[in-house]
Amino acid sequence: MAEVTQIVDQVVIAEKYNFSLTEYLHRTPECRYFDIVDFQAPQPPEIVESYRHIGRKLIFTPMESHIRNECIEREIELIPEKDLISDKAIEEAKLCRLVDQTVCVSNKDRDAVASCVKADVVAIETCISDIEFNGEHVPINPNDQAVCYVAYFGSETNREALIWYLNNVHPKICEALTDYEFRIIGQGDISDILAGKHKAVRYIGEVDRIAPHIKAAAVGIAPALSGSGFRGKISQHAFLGIPTVATSLAAEGLAYKHGHSIMISDDPEVFADCVIKLLQDGRLRRQISEAAADVCQSAYVWESKWQDITKVYDLPPNPDVISMPTVHAVVPSYQHAPFIEERLRSIFGQEYPNIRVSVIDDHSNDGSHEIIERLRGEFEFDYIRKDQNSGTPFSAWKYAAENTTEDLIWICESDDSCDSFLVGKLVKLIMMRNRTKIAYSASWMMDEHGEACGSTDNYFSKIFHPTRWQRAFIADGSHELHQYQRFGMVLPNMSSALIDSAVFKAAFTPSVMKYKLAGDWLFVGQAMQLGDIAYTPERLNRFRQHDETARTRTDIARRTAEHVSVRLSLSAQSGASERDIMEAVKYDLRELCGNPDLADQVRIEMKNLDPDHEKQLAALLKEHCSHGGLGNDLAKALENRTL
C-alpha cells in the first residue's frame, strides 16, 4: 500500500460496499470518479454498466475462471462460447465481453477465456503480497515433521482436496513416521471432514497472519484435484523457505520444476512418498526449498510483473519514479527523561528512509541529556543542548524553520511516540494532491505508564463534529480554518503531523512565539491558508497525557486570554464577519460575562499579547453582556448552535 498510494491519487477502502452503484452513492457523500473499476466477482450486466458513469475503464478479474473450470471438468483443453454448458461459465463469458478488459490471474485461465470469448483478455499472475509476507516471520510452534495445508475451506475445490489427502495420503505418512503432524490452516467449517477422528491432525483454523504458521512447518502441500485460478500457496511456501508437494493440476502453468523446485504427483502413494522423503531428508528439503525460493523471486514477486501491471492500470512504467520526499524530524526535548528513548526509537523505527533527525534539548536537568548522549552511540542524529532554558516551547520550532532543507518538517514532541508507518502514510497523503501541505493522523492518548487512555476520536466528535473525523479526507485549508480551526485546534498533537517546509517557515511568524499555550493553534491556522490539509483516521500517533501540563499550570486568565486572542486572530485571517467572530468566542464571552473580575484579568493579559485584540474583546463584552448577564444575541447564539 505504501507504493500504491504514491502512484494513484486516492485509495478508498470500501469494506462494506456491495457492487451496486446505488449502494456506493448511498455510502459516499461526495461521489468520486475512478480511472479503474475492477470487478472481482461476476455481476449482473446492469450493475456493471451502471459503473460506466463513474469509471473510465471497467475491468473484470475472475479470481477463478468458471470457463476454465468447465474445461477441466469436461477434460477439454479449450471450449468455444457457443458450446459452454455451465450457467456460471456462460455468465462469465457475457461479462468478459461487457467490460473493457478481463485480467486473469493465471496464464492457463487466460488461454481458456481468450479462446472462448472474443474480448480483450490478459493475464497477470498472482504474486506474493508484501502486506502478508513482508519483514521477519517468527514461526509459531515450529516442527520439522509438520506438513501444512493452507486454504479457504468455504471452497468445494479445497474441501475435495483435503478429503483426498486425509483419506489417501495421510494414513501412509502416519504409518511411516511416528512424529509426523498434519496442520490445517484456514477459514471455513470442516468439522464434518474431521469427524472421522484422523490421528496426527492439528486443526489450526483461521489466523490473523498465515506466514508464521507456514514457516513453522517442514513441508507444504497443494493437492488440488479441480478448479482454476492461481495456486498461490506454492509461491507462499517457496517465499517462506519450505518445499511443496503438489498435484499436477496445482502446479500446472507454474515455473516450478518437478524434482528441482517442487515435487509433483497425482498418485496418492507417490504423493505420500514425496512428503515422507522430504520430512526424512533435511538436505533434500533445503535443496528443493532454495531452488523454489529462486523461482519465486524471479517469477512471482510484484517487480517481475510490473510491466504487465502498468499496461493494465495505466501506471508509471518504472516504480523508481515514485517520489519519496525528505523529512526533517525535530525533537523539542525538555524534562522528559522517562520518555525520550521511546520517542527516538519510534522515529528511527520508521518504515521510511528519508528522515534526518535533530534533537534540541532546552537545558533539561532530569537526566534527558545523558540518555540522548547514550543514544547517539546507536543512532545518527544532530544534537543541540542549550546552555540555558529558552523560556518558550517554540525554540525548537524556530530551529526547524531556520535549519531545514528537507521537503517536510515533523515536530516530534519528546514524550510522544508513534507507529512505524506514520511517516510513510502521511507522506503518501501529502503526495496525493499537489496542493496538500499538511497531513495528520488520529492519535492514541497514553498515560504516563504507556497505557492507552483514549483517543482523539472522542476529542473530534465532542468538540467539532460527531462523524467527520471517522473517515479520511483532504480539505481546502482556508475552508478548514473558517469552519473549524478558528473555533479550536483541529490538530490536537503536533507529533501526528507532517508539514510542507515552505509552509512551516511562512506560518511560523513572530506572533506564534508570543503564545505559551496556544501558539501551535495559531501556527496551524496560519499554515492552513497556504494549502490543503489531509487526515487519516488511522491511530498512527501516541500522544502522552500528563496529570500536570503547561496548560494546567498556567492560570485561567492567561489561558483564556490566549484562547480568545487566537480565535480573534484566526477569525480575522479567515475573513469572518462580525457574526462569525461572535460565534467563535461565544463560550468565552459567556464565561467572562458571568465573572467580571476574570474578564478584567483577561483583558490585562491580552494587552500584553495584542492590544488590538484587547480592544476587540472589550467591545464584544460591552455589546453582548448586560447587567452581569448575557445579551439577547449571545443568548440566542449559545442556544442555536453547539460545536
Image (spheres, rainbow, N blue to C red):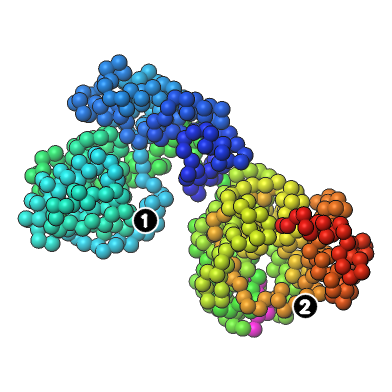
Q: How many marks?
A: 2
- x, y percent for residue 45: 44, 24
- x, y percent for residue 573: 82, 53
Task: Find out whether residue 582 is within the magenta segment.
Answer: no
Circle 2 sits on which residue?
555
SS at mark 2? loop
Residue range highlighted in magenta: 359-365
Say left or right for 41 vs 603: left
Residue type indicated by callout 2: Asp
Residue lying farthest top? 82
Circle 1 sits on which residue?
208
Residue appearing at x 92%, y 69% in the figure: 627
Residue appearing at x 6%, y 55% in the figure: 175
Badge 1 density bin: few <14, some 14–19, many ≥20, Cα 10 Å: few
Residue 60 picture quarter: top left
Q: Is residue 542 above or below residue 265?
A: below
**Is residue 283 in view from this perspective?**
no
Residue type indicated by callout 1: Asp
SS at mark 1? loop
**Is residue 598 in view from this perspective?**
yes
Could you give the CA–CA distance between mark 2 and mark 1, rounded to whole angstroms?
50 Å
Quadrant (top left, top right, bottom left, bottom right) of the C terminus: bottom right
Residue appearing at x 33%, y 23% in the figure: 90
Disc 2 or 1, which lies upstream in sequence?
1
- x, y percent for residue 193: 18, 48
Residue appearing at x 35%, y 59% in the figure: 137
